[in-house]
Amino acid sequence: MSSPLPASSLAPTKIVIPDLVSHCTIPVRCNRHNKQASVESKQWLFRGGDLSQKKRDAFHGLKAGYLTSMCYPLSGFPQLRMDDRGTLGSAIKVMDPLYHPHSSRPTSRVGKMTKDYWQRLIQTASPGAQQRFIETFDMFFQAITEQARDRANGVIPDLESYIAIRRDTSGCKPCWALIEYANNLDLSWEVMDHPIIRGLGEAANDLVTWSNDIFSFNVEQSKGDTHNMIIVVQKQQGLDLQSAVDFVGDLCKHSIDRFHFLRENLPSWDPETDQQVAVYVDGLADWITGSLKWSFESERYFGKQGLEVKRTRVVTLLPRRA
């Protein structure tokens, strides 16, 4: 592990982000239940009245329902109506209802929400999808615990270590299990462990995650957050800020190219399995293109300037917070 990046390296006032939207030729699809599911999901999240107006406004600007609708465009309404994963608190409160859906008696709001969500999911999700969701969600909590320690200590990991942990802190892997649930798929472990299927999931994860690091960099650098690939690359490669942004942008483009290559070389099993695999891979593609489109239309990264940033690709850096 290396020491924190000196503040002087953040002297530039602007960065130009890569044009990932043009590089991604996958068409965007949106679920026809988008509006209804978004409204009901918000009502479910706000139930209880203990969220401040500021948090409610932030969730409205997040447009989480829109992202979900693009990432799961073919799912039915019951599967589409999901929770806001970003509100999940402690691992124990969340994981206990997942491991013990019938015997757990959560008292916290997040625990009750998790149990309510999970009991709806297990009604139709295949056993494999359920197990993959639980295992990858558990890995997510382990990874963010390590990430929190690094953040608290201002530690910047090397690039290889960062890539490994970021694939879990992204939360993408549980979302890949939800592709199975949303589309009523029942894929065997043998199929899901095939190198090409795993490679496709990894390529999609990398694009979603690394592009997120580019889009979230401005806010994170203003808070002194070191858990971002741009900072990792800048430190390890000895690059200036814009060169580091370009470096990560090239990795993102390569991940899209890698996804297309693997998709064109899918193996064949039997007609039914091949059809389910095609739906699953389409779901990964929806996550790639949906996340890119949402990143500029949500207020999460660029506030209300997202479409302007998408057009110019210029981001004015925020000052470092005290």
Image (cartoon, rainbow, N blue to C red):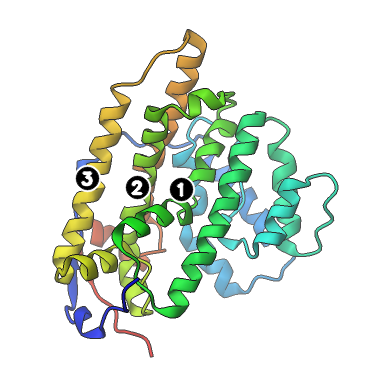
Determine which of the numbered discs, if any, sits on residue 253 in the image.
Answer: 3
Choose between 306 and 206: the one closer to the eye.
206
Q: Nearer the viewer, mark 2 or mark 1?
A: 2
Q: Earlier in the sequence, mark 2 or mark 1?
A: 1
- Report the Cα–Cα distance between label 3 and label 2: 10 Å
- Report the Cα–Cα distance between label 1 and label 3: 21 Å
Q: Which residue is mark 2?
A: 206
Q: Earlier in the sequence, mark 1 or mark 3?
A: 1
Q: Nearer the viewer, mark 1 or mark 3?
A: 3
Specify few, some or many for label 3: CA neighbours under 10 Å numbering under 14, 14-19, or 20 or more.
Answer: some
Specify few, some or many for label 1: CA neighbours under 10 Å numbering under 14, 14-19, or 20 or more.
Answer: many
Residue at 50% x, 30% y: name it: 74
Q: Which residue is mark 1?
A: 67
Residue at 18% x, 78% y: name it: 13
Give the image quarter of residue 237.
bottom left
Choose between 74 and 107: the one closer to the eye.
107
Residue at 75% x, 51% y: name it: 97
- Residue 296 location in percent, x, y? 33, 56
Q: The disc labelled 1 sits on which kind of residue?
A: Leu
Choose between 23 and 136: the one closer to the eye.
136
Considering every residue shown, the one lying at the far front of the view is 1
- Residue 55 location in percent, x, y? 57, 70
